Image (spheres, rainbow, N blue to C red):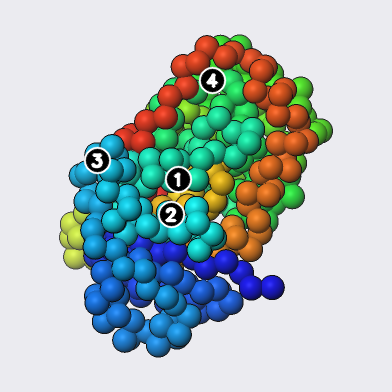
Amino acid sequence: MSLPRIAVDAMGGDEGVRVMVEGAALARRRHDQFKFLLVGDEARIRQALENHPNLRAASEILHAPDVVSGDEKPTQALRRSKTTSMGLAVDAVKQGLAGAAVSAGNTGALMAMSKLALRTMPGIDRPALAALLPTLGEHDLVMLDLGANTDCDARNLVQFAIMGAAYSRIVNGLESPRVRLLNIGTEETKGTGDLQDAAALLKRADGQLAFTFDGFTEADKLSRGDVDVVVTDGFSGNIALKAMEGAARFVADLLRRSFSSSLRSKFGFLISRPATELLKHHLDPNNHNGAVFLGLNGVVVKSHGSASALGVAHAVAVAARLLEENLTERIAADLARVGEEAIRTSGRTNGKAAVNPEVAPAAEKRA
């Protein structure tokens, strides 16, 4: 059975066509059964494909005359979705011309276009932005939401937990991921009413879900490796993600400064270089690239704008893996286990949840 094509927004990202095409070519070496729809300036794409005959043989080009700029507001980008490379890549998924779309362009615009074109799955109120974060454990951490929804009620958080667990089972190969809610403490009495209600709903559904709910976790424990999926609202998730990124840069810069401070330090660097190279590899966002908009009727993957060809390859590989493992169908099956009505009507329904596609950009830097 032939697998659906992957649509690649070839114009997105800081480096544009060259890196996007090179990344797609690298990804196809691992997933050679996939074909590609490269969307963007046809002349520039054809020129870039000259260096990648293997990808060229497996690709079609869809010409797009316009590009979404990095600082363009989502509302403005939506009005030009029929002529931009990003808009046409997402539309290809809607029209069935591709099974997934990958873009390294404007995150807010991509979220807005994807939600409008693909709509949310039955039983899902809000899509969520999920990413993979490095940990000290055997597996990366799936964290969501990272900026798509600034304020969430209990049912949103429960839906995020179901989607995040399905994603973790695919990307990390876990049979029953450990899921926790991000909170200001691990005690059952801590947190907002919505967090309390979400925890109660998840506890009541324990045994019906394909994951284990382990209660609450705090932000300083995210990288320990003792949890597989962390669920939070997009406001808190975006802040936590930026804090983690800042801490990683701080450690890297501090080591660089320390190793260059004296001749003895430089000699010490040579001795410890294998360890520092391992640290660099572990913290390199290119090795965790590919944030996913979960909860849509289709697969959309966001590569961070500054990704190298290797980073783009990781993002494309994420899209391929999700298509191979039928992510959307898995989420639908998990929703059916607990009952859509139980999730939609239980807990606090104060209507505060609001999608804010303009808050999401931090997630593109890690996954």
Query: Pointer 1 and pointer 2: residues touching (CB < 8 Å)?
Result: yes
Query: Pointer 1 and pointer 4: residues touching (CB < 8 Å)?
Result: no
10 Å neighbourhood of mark 1: few (<14), some, or many (≥20)? some
User: Cα distance, mark 3 to mark 2?
Assistant: 17 Å
Q: Earlier in the sequence, mark 4 or mark 2?
A: 2
Out of 162 and 261, give the one closest to the viewer.
Answer: 162
Q: Which residue is mark 2?
A: 91
Which residue is drawn at the image coordinates 26% and 69% (left, top)? 41
Q: Of the residues shown, which amino acid type is indicated by label 4? A: Asp
Q: Of the residues shown, which amino acid type is indicated by label 3? A: Gln
Q: Which residue is mark 4?
A: 153
Residue 186 % position (x, y): 59, 22
Q: Which residue is mark 1?
A: 117
What quarter of the picture does the N terminus occupy? Answer: bottom right
In front: mark 1 or mark 4? 1
Q: Of the residues shown, which amino acid type is indicated by label 1? A: Ala
Residue 105 shows in this picture? yes
Q: Of the residues shown, which amino acid type is indicated by label 2? A: Asp
Residue 302 % position (x, y): 41, 52
User: Cα distance, mark 1 to mark 4?
Assistant: 24 Å
Which label number is shown at residue 76? Answer: 3
In front: mark 3 or mark 4? 3
10 Å neighbourhood of mark 3: few (<14), some, or many (≥20)? few
